[in-house]
């Protein structure tokens, strides 16, 4: 990965692909998301998730003062990633559910007590980014 732009493009593509699989897997947790329309709906959602992972990358890079923080991640980078991921996950779900009313949960969605916010989409921004950055690290260091 020779340039920052190439690295960010790879990160976006990787994040979009991983989140697409997650989006498809969680379709039964939402009302009205049925196949085949879910294929396109989940793809568009995964593009947004890819942008959120880029935001998360930038937030951690700012705190760590390094655009290569994922090469040698520290406890602080993981804590920052978790804090930003949790905040983003909660904010996006709150907005989509209560403000924009873009989606509704089915009875299968576990919700975070007292918030009405789905636990699965919040976990998405907590669990997937570390895995995505691990793969990015592997890709960046495999030639070394």
Image (spheres, rainbow, N blue to C red):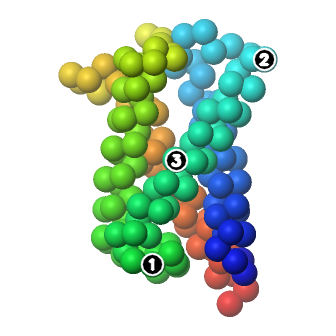
Mark 3 element type: helix
Image point (69%, 77%), residue name: 3
Which label lies toward us, 2 or 1? Answer: 1
Q: Quadrant of the N terminus?
A: bottom right
Mark 1 element type: loop
In terms of sequence position, does the residue under pointer 2 or pointer 3 come before the other? Answer: 2
Residue highlighted by disc 2: 36
Q: Is residue 37 left or right of residue 88?
A: right
Q: Nearer the viewer, residue 99 or 90?
A: 99
Residue highlighted by disc 3: 52
Compared to residue 18, the image places residue 25 above or below, namely above
Q: Quadrant of the C terminus?
A: bottom right
Q: Is residue 81 left or right of residue 35?
A: left
Residue 66 falls in which quadrant of the image? bottom left
Image coordinates for residue 67, horizontal then vertical, percent:
51, 75
Tell me whether circle 2 and circle 1 mark residues in contact (CB < 8 Å): no
Q: Residues within 10 Å of mark 1 (few under 14, many from 20)?
A: few
In terms of sequence position, does the residue under pointer 2 or pointer 1 come before the other? Answer: 2
Residue highlighted by disc 1: 66
Mark 2 element type: loop
Image point (37%, 17%), residue name: 98
Name the residue at the right extreme. 36
Q: Nearer the viewer, residue 130 or 56?
A: 56
The numbered mark at residue 80 is none
Could you tell me how far apart the alpha carbons at marks 1 and 3 are, in whole angstroms?
19 Å
Image coordinates for residue 130, horizontal then vertical, percent:
48, 59
């Amino acid at each position: 990965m020779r340039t920052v732009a190439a690295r960010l493009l790879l990160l976006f593509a990787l994040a979009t692909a991983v989140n697409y699989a997650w989006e498809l897997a969680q379709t039964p947790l939402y009302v009205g998301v049925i196949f085949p329309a879910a294929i396109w709906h989940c793809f568009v959602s995964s593009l947004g998730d890819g942008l959120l992972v880029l935001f998360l990358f930038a937030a951690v890079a700012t705190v760590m003062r390094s655009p290569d923080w994922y090469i040698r991640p520290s406890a602080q980078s993981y804590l920052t990633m978790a804090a930003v991921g949790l905040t983003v996950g909660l904010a996006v779900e709150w907005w989509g559910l209560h403000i924009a009313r873009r989606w509704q949960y089915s009875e299968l969605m576990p919700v975070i007590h007292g918030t009405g916010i789905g636990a699965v989409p919040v976990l998405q921004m907590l669990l997937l980014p570390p895995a995505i950055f691990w793969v990015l690290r592997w890709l960046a260091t495999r030639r070394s």
